[in-house]
Image (tube, rainbow, N blue to C red):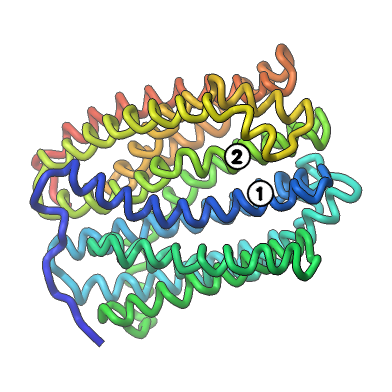
Amino acid sequence: MTTSTAPAGYLAGPVSTHINRMTASAGLGLLALFTVDFADLFFISLLGERELAAAVGFAASILFFCQSLSIGLTIAVGATVSRALGADRVDRARELIASSFVLIILITSVVAGSVWLWRESILTLLGAEGYTLSQASNYIAIILPSFVPVSIGMAAGGVIRAKGDAKGALWVTLSGAIVNAIFDPILIFAMNLDLTGAALASVMARLTIFGYGVFKLYKYGLLSRPKPAEVRRDFTTISSIAVPSVLTNLATPIGLAFVTATMAQYGDSAVAGLAIITRLQQVAFVALFALSGAVGPIAGQNWGAGYHDRVSAVLTESVRFVFRYCLVVCVALAALTEPIVWAFQASPQAAELIRWFTLGLSAIFVFNGITFVTNALFNNLGAPKTSTLFNVLKATVFTVPFVWAGARWFGAPGALIGQGLGSAMIALAGWYWCRRYVGGLRGQSV
């Protein structure tokens, strides 16, 4: 076992270089996972049953809720540990990791158990029915038990990223993606398990992420046995970031659930179209999802070291990254519109929704990217409640009325239009407030 006591790695060198390097590392790992999820839906579409594609769409809303909870907990672990590492307090980092894992196990066990028990009622509220409902319920029932270990694995990856090990953090997620890619076609087609096979492959991937993530922490000497006294002591410290961070991240799937329920009014084809768009967003804009996890530790370390000018640079360089990346991706999506429609054998209604997204609404991800960045900075710079406030507003005030009005005036495409308009408005408000907050950090102690 090797023990590292080296200082954190984000305190010197160009901020933009750290952002690009860590975003690329995290992005490759996420891309591997998102691509496999994308392939899952692609393979299911080839089976020729729109109900199965719709089942994936309904299930995705619930699983996204659980995934967002894991991400929120991961952000909290990364934020607390990155500050300790930034101050070169490795022993304190070990204690925080152990206490965080206890908290994660408790929270995810309760959530996974509750969702598993009430999954059919939740799916019914979203608009699923009949064969689609039964398939979505079975899919969720298989995957949910792996929620606890994968949450630990994701948190381990967050710690590794906070330490500055881009390659190690990449392989935490990449290992799971490789396992999923191998077993997906075997279970779905060779063994004729259809949607059940896709779920089983996902479970195997999640267990791999858990195993590799914990193994890397052991190799770094960052694992320690949790002690009740330390867990009780650290509970307040971790919860002060975890609670608002979790609430922040849960706001997005709640908004997606409302969009899914709205789409369900237009039938399984509309829900299937939304499922394709959701998976397409994940793959195409993977760097923005990765950016949200990369900028937090960078800003947190520099804040912990008292380098306030570098914290300001994180916000500026991150927003520049968002604009450059979205320009390239939006042009590519527009050019690939018809191949995407053809590849998924989309029904006329699903194809219409895909075209609305690829030929215009994809540009909304500029604003989603800005929101990702500001959320990460608020969470890592001592203002997690502000992040929660903006995300709750986004999921409610800036989603529900906009989606409802858009659907009422323009049908299923209108729901996407309304969602995009609300996202743009709240993103601009968050960016303005984040600039003011970061500017006022000078002179504050961590």
Residue for point 32% across, 29% down: 324
Return the mark for residue 213: none
* 335 is higher (above) or lower (below) than 269: above
Residue for point 60% across, 36% down: 255
Residue for point 62% across, 36% down: 277
Q: Could you say which quadrant of the image residue 411 lies in? A: top right
In the rendered image, is residue 106 in sight? no
Q: Position of residue 327 (x, y in %)?
A: 38, 26
Residue for point 68% across, 21% down: 413
Q: Position of residue 185 (x, y in %)?
A: 67, 63
Q: Position of residue 318 (x, y in %)?
A: 27, 36
Label 1 and label 2: CA atoms lie apart by 9 Å
Circle 1: element type? helix
In the rendered image, is residue 272 in sight? yes
Q: Which residue is mark 1?
A: 60
- Observer-nearest residue: 205 or 385? 205
Query: Callout 1: few (<14), some (14-19), or many (20+) C-alpha neighbours within 10 Å?
Result: many
Q: Which residue is mark 2?
A: 278
Circle 2: element type? helix
What amino acid type should be assigned to the residue bearing mark 2? Thr
**Which residue reaches farthest bottom?**
1
Q: From the viewer's perspective, is 236 left or right of 11?
A: right
Q: From the viewer's perspective, is 236 left or right of 423?
A: left
* 326 is higher (above) or lower (below) than 140: above
Q: Quadrant of the N terminus?
A: bottom left
User: Are the residues at dot 1 and dot 2 in contact (C-beta closer than 8 Å)?
Assistant: yes
Q: Nearer the viewer, mark 1 or mark 2?
A: 2
Q: Earlier in the sequence, mark 1 or mark 2?
A: 1
What amino acid type should be assigned to the residue bearing mark 1? Ala
